[in-house]
Image (spheres, helix red, strand yellow):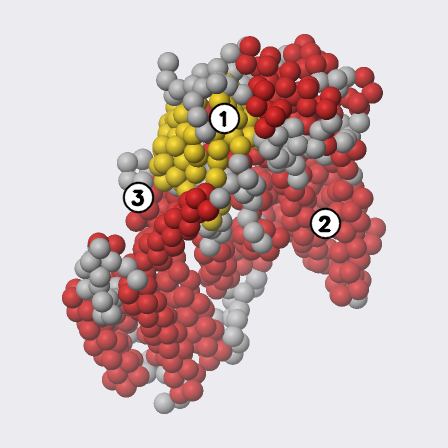
Amino acid sequence: MTRGSVVRAVARKDLAVEMGSRVVINQVAPFALVVMVMFAFALDNEGILSRVAPGLVWLATLFSMLVVVQRSFAVESADGALDALRVAGVDPVAIFLGKSVALMVQLFALEVLLVCTAFVLYGVEPSPAGWAEAFVTMVAATVGLGFVGTLYGGLAAGARGRETLLPLLLLPVVAPVLIGATRATEAAFGSGGASVSEGWPWIGLLAVFAVLFGAAGSAAFGPLVDE
Amino acid sequence: MTNVVELRGVVAVLGGFPALAGVDLTVGRGEVLLLQGPNGAGKTSVLRVCAGLLPVERGGGSILGMDITAQRDSIRSRVGLLGHTNGLYLDLTVAQNIRFWASTVGASRDEVSAAMQRMGLDGRLASVKADRLSAGQRRRCALASMIVRRAELWLLDEPHAGLDAAGRDEIDSVLRDAVAAGATVVVSSHELERAGALATRVVTVDGGTVRDGGGAR
Amino acid sequence: MTPTGAHATTGTPATRRLGLVVCVLLVLLVLSGLWWSAEDVVQGSTVRIMYVHVPSIWVAYMAFALTAVCSGAYLSRGTRSVAWDRVAGASAEIGVLFVAVSLVTGSLWGRLTWGTYWVWDARLTSTAFLFITYVGYLAVRRLGGTLRQRARRSAVLALLAVLEIPLVHFSVELWRSLHQEASVANPNAKVEMDGLMLFTLMLGLATFTALFVWLVLHRQRVILLEDTVADRGLDEAIASRRDEAGAR
Amino acid sequence: MEHASFIIASYVLTFGSIAAYAAWVVRRGRGLARRASREEMPWT
């Protein structure tokens, strides 16, 4: 049994669960859209909206992520599947990577939706190079978010008060992603006169974040979830 | 060969409550041990300790010759637990569930279809979502994944609960096959008549302790 | 079991002496900070806040560093003693207290110097994140479970914080340096310090360090007692649990 | 002294909260130590 095949099995399973239940499609995605509309009500100014659109996109992503992460582990504990995985001695690193990959796929889909919404509702108009940069930003940010979300989601999964514990633990950690992804997206969208080239250092930050938390999560997930 | 299960003075705590208050238990290879006792006596906790799910607070012991605290990871891949929950993903179909389990332990396609056939899960049931299944059908799913796992120590928590007569017979026959294949079984049950027929030994769990209900039968 | 009587404390002659030293130093610090030392040429009287602000943030950094070291020691093989976890927990709790204190005194100072309680300065922002991170750490310590569970979980979390904090700090710094035009005021502005002012600052650092040692010693003993009493409760619970069996 | 209120406030806040915490720790320690034996308190 190689680690890679377990990773694939876990990721495929999580995505199959989503295809079977459609919770992210039917509930989280509309939630994210509502958040975007509420931002527009709160700010009530088209000039400001297109200026702050990148930040709103990523804030909406983070809020949606909290829900998706909770869901990802609720599925495991609904009928004791996580216990069963533990008893089966399934490699926790493979569980971590597999669940991270599934989370990344779902987050990426949400981000695409949110960016398109910002394009339509907030009046942002990126150049072709900007679209490319936005794509790279989304990939880099999503990988990091997937790792951190799975890591802290697993820790909070078994805990009492997990609904409040998860945001408390997770949001401070993802601050670099919010900052980096927002700045990079601003560059991509040209918000506030930013040029596309200004975004690349921030994408570097996102990549560093993703690599560090991928490694740390692989090491820490087992001890955190198991004990 | 050492005993399959050896617990010495095991105390296990659940949210501050001593679920196990000093358990001594020995199970030899090939035995079918029946744990009986009232609700809340600690039967489930004994099984969860043996499966390496519930950490041992005091005392110690070994499972399949491996230390129960230091070598929990190695123990786990060699035991199978059928608890109150079935470990199913309710949004997946029966076939998806069992195939997932098979893929995490590296079972072949043939083994999977054999196990599904054995539990009567092929055909129409295979494509039904787990949350539409009856309690008995869910049990059968869980048993199918146990079969696929080829565990050396089978731990079953009230496996007969909520099943009709046919379902119970099925479980008994799966257990007999497992024992014939060399597995050791620890099973908890209210239904002494039924489980007692299989058991080679019966012990009583009460107040988080084990009273040996007499030697081998 | 030797009863300890009504005068049992977490103190020892050594900590009592240390406590006395801390008290004397504190009096000296207040006198020196509020009366003896002169006002700063640039900052004026607000420099007096620095004599308590700088030592508190210093203690907080020291506390979190100690938490990280103890967590690493707990996780490394051969030293797996829950004593490490107690020191880590005590230290983190004290660190949270001192970060909170330094955030408040810092914003009071900021109000006087910058005219505003808060500026989105890199150091302030990442200190706020530091605070929230360790509040989360303390929440995880209270999740329950066995002592070993608590120790392992919180040790792993403390080491993750070691990874998280520099990342947050770095990104916040990058955020400010690339984004904001010249900051309101540079808190690092060279302060001309006369001898007594420097003395007062050093006195503050020494006092707070001694205070930190005193607090950690006591707090980790209290944690030991909490664990012991919980364990005693467990003994009683085990006994009554075993009686259940006899009753039937 | 200029800004006396702010300066006094920061001293009071700092030492007040530390003193409150220290008092809480000591009192909690006393309460628990009364229920513990000498062997359980390795520092005695």
Distance from label 2 to label 1 (Cα)?
72 Å
**Rendered location of residue B49, percent (x, y):** 47, 34
Circles 3 and 2 on the same chain: no
| Coordinates of residue C233 in the picture (x, y in percent) | 38, 54
Q: Is residue C104 left or right of residue C194?
A: right
Query: What element does badge 3 sit on?
Result: loop
Chain for disc number 1? B
Using the numbered discs, state the Cα–Cα distance from disc 1 to disc 3 in whole angstroms.
39 Å
Label 1 close to label 3 by CB (< 8 Å): no
What SS does tag 2 mark?
A: helix
Type of residue at label 2? Phe
Q: Which quadrant: the N terminus of chain A? A: top right
**Residue B163 occupies quadrant:** top right
Question: Does residue A209 appear left or right of residue A45 in this picture?
Answer: left
Residue at which label 3 appears: C81
| Residue plotted at (55% across, 10% down) | B180
Tell me, for residue A189, which label it has, or none.
2
Q: Which residue is mark 1?
A: B202
Q: Nearer the viewer, residue C213 or A209?
A: C213
